[in-house]
Image: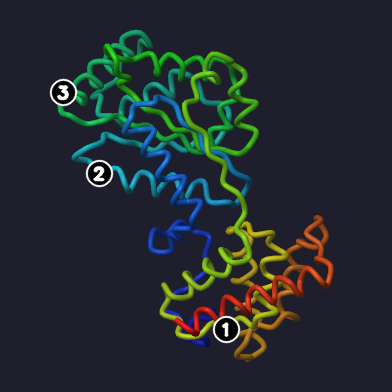
Amino acid sequence: MGYNDHFNFDREPFSNAPNDKFYFDSDQHNQALLRLKYSVDSDKGLAVLVGGVGTGKTTLARRMLDVLPYEEYESSLLVMIHSAVTPEWIMSRICMQLGVKSPDLSPLKMLKQLYERLLEIEKEGRKAVVLIDEAQMLQTRELMEEFRGLLNLEIPDKKLLNIIFFGLPELDSVMQLDPPLAQRVAFKYTLKPLSVEAALDYINHRLKVVNCEKTPFSDDALALIHNFSKGVPRLINTICDNALFETFLRHEAEVSAEIVTNVAEDLGLVAVGLTLAPVEELDEELDEIEIIFDGLEEK
């Protein structure tokens, strides 16, 4: 049994399942998208976006795909789910997603097919874009060399294929397996955890999507949510979801600081080092949250 009826939500506001309706256009996500799209539109070749676990890389990759209309771009998204992929597998998937029919089993013939398809896309006045999520899983020099070879597909004064890597910070080390590829990175952006203000905006945004008229979180609960999550969106979702359910089980109307603390302890966030900040730091966060709420009320 869920808590949606208890709080009059249309649906669960803090699920970690991908859902475009909950996309939060934070300042840094907006800046990242602007830069990534500029990289594609100016045919830079290779761009990289990195961020810690749960900071929204996959969400941003999906959003990037959404803002590339078919009329102007031939785009695809590949998610690496393990490190055992081969260069041939990567090439065949890219070929199929960019519109190559029946990729040849021969790597050389497959490369020729892809080049011809890229020329077709160019003649149509469109740009070819491949987004690679979880790119840190590409853990062999052969894979890095394969991508370097793909970046060599070009015509005079223009690259035919743009590639964007999305991955964890260790992607930097992975790319050093092939230094010439690492040197070809034309643009790089790093996603960071949300600030107190951005985290509050994030929570309010998700509540608004489910038609919540008044936040069920107390001010001190919000301060603790940011403290325990360290501003990581995925952890914010997990804490909020569990806290709302616990509040529902207690038949209470407001998520309290006590409930958030209990939830954080149950999730092991305190034990793994996300310890409670000094009282004065929490007071500063609470003061900032109160200022933000005051500003919202004035509006």
Which residue is identified by label 3?
123
Q: Position of residue 256 (x, y in %)?
A: 69, 83
Left or right placement of residue 57 versus residue 174 in this view: left
Seen from this angle, which residue lies furthest top?
108
Q: Position of residue 294 (x, y in %)?
A: 56, 82
Quadrant where the image shows the C terminus: bottom left
How is this picture coloured?
rainbow
* Marker disc for residue 69: 2
* Label 1 neighbour load within 10 Å: few <14, some 14-19, many 20+: some
Of label 1 and label 3, which has the lower sequence position? 3
Q: Position of residue 219 (x, y in %)?
A: 65, 80
* Label 2 neighbour load within 10 Å: few <14, some 14-19, many 20+: few
Of label 3 and label 2, which has the lower sequence position? 2
Viewer-proximal residue among 283 and 86: 283
Q: How many marks?
A: 3
Compared with 9, 158 (above or below) is above
* Label 3 neighbour load within 10 Å: few <14, some 14-19, many 20+: few
The amino acid pointed to by label 2 is Pro
Quadrant where the image shows the N terminus: bottom right
Residue at left 64%, top 72%? 242
Viewer-proximal residue among 281 and 78: 281
- Asked whether disc 3 touches disc 2, contact meaning CB atoms under 8 Å apart, the reply is no
Viewer-proximal residue among 216 and 190: 190
Viewer-proximal residue among 289 and 170: 289
Residue at left 37%, top 37%? 38
Compared with 206, 91 (above or below) is above
Which residue is identified by label 1?
216
Quarter-of-image position of residue 239: bottom right
